[in-house]
Image (cartoon, grey):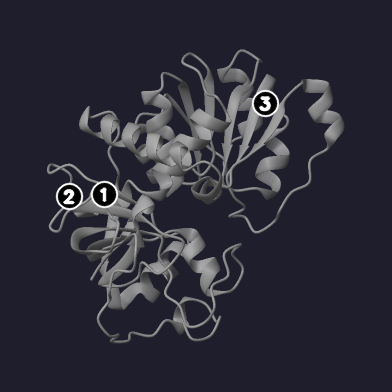
Amino acid sequence: MRELAGPTALEREELSEVHAGPGEVVIDVKAVGCNFFDILITEGKYQVKPELPFSPGAEVAGIVRTLGEGVSRFSVGDRVSALLEYGGFTSTVAAPEARVFPIPSEMTFEEAAALGLVYQTSYVGLVNRARLEAGETLLVHAAAGGVGLAAVQLGVALGAKVIGTAGTTEKLALVKQHGAHEVINYREEDWVERVKELTAGRGADVIYDPVGGDTFDLSTKCIAFEGRILIIGFASGRIPSAKMNRVLVKNFSLVGLHWGLYFKKNPQVIQEAQEAIVRLHSMGKIAPLVSATHPLCDADAALAALAGRKTTGKVILIP
């Protein structure tokens, strides 16, 4: 990116050799995950605002090429994934050791990239922030998207009853296929009343909301007593305001998640989440859906499809 003009402004450039600084791991990238905030960062609308020029991309998987001074957890040739602030749309990247994780031999690079941020976001959100417990009801909005499908799978793996919302028959079938116990077409049904019906009037114990806007407003009408609304993002474009009298009357909690802040405040949370995610994957309890792969040089088209809500699951770039 040389100007903040959105994904269409992405330019392919050949750069000089990438060298490992102290505490860094240089990775030959084999797969890159795409996320909605990659679009925002190219427009200057994300909370992370790198100096120009920069490359977007927060999750990569590949093979360790070189190690910087002081790196002790990895060796040249190791298969790894990395979770970055930005800079992942590249064929070679240097990442701080704390942001690099081993991946098992049976996991593909595409799976490793797809298991990165969306599963981290959903796991930390559901486990560390919302304290989801087995037997509770979890309502997942935009359940056919990247973070949505991850939340559905993890909710089921954690023993919750999972309800997923989506806007088409095809997406609802996909959500059901990935483990949701019930699905709701938010375009054709009064989903607030449907959630109440499915919970015998109680409402959902945890609501996973990556949408914001009207979706958040209506979620406050079907949250259970002492429930938790987990604020993941605002894909609808409108940042809502809560009616605090409703929060008080129903004894529910609003729980925010700024996942990336854990790298600075408590990196152990991310380390433990990654170990749990890999363990659940090896047990067959979660499996990322890679819906499309594009060459790295077509990153603009990949992000355009993501922005147009024409994707399900994860979109992966291949250098």
**What x and y, as percent, mark residue 212?**
65, 48
Provide residue 176's location: percent of width, then percent of height: 37, 32
Q: Residues within 10 Å of mark 3 (few under 14, many from 20)?
A: many
Mark 2 secondary-structure assignment: loop
Foreground mark, 2 or 3, reads 2
Q: Nearer the viewer, mark 1 or mark 3?
A: 1
Residue 230 on image: x %, y %: 61, 36
Q: Look at mark 3 in the image and give the residue it sits on.
A: 223
Earlier sequence position, callout 1 versus callout 3: 1
Circle number at residue 254: none
Residue shown at 43% from the left, 41% from the top: 270
Label 2: which residue? 108
Q: Residue at x 41, y 22 (%)?
A: 158
Tag 3, which secondary structure?
strand
Q: Is residue 244 visible?
A: yes
Q: Are marks 2 and 1 in contact (CB under 8 Å)?
A: yes
Task: From the top left corner, tell me how far across and down residue 234 is, in percent.
Answer: 62, 53
Q: Which of the image's four quarters has the C terminus?
A: bottom left
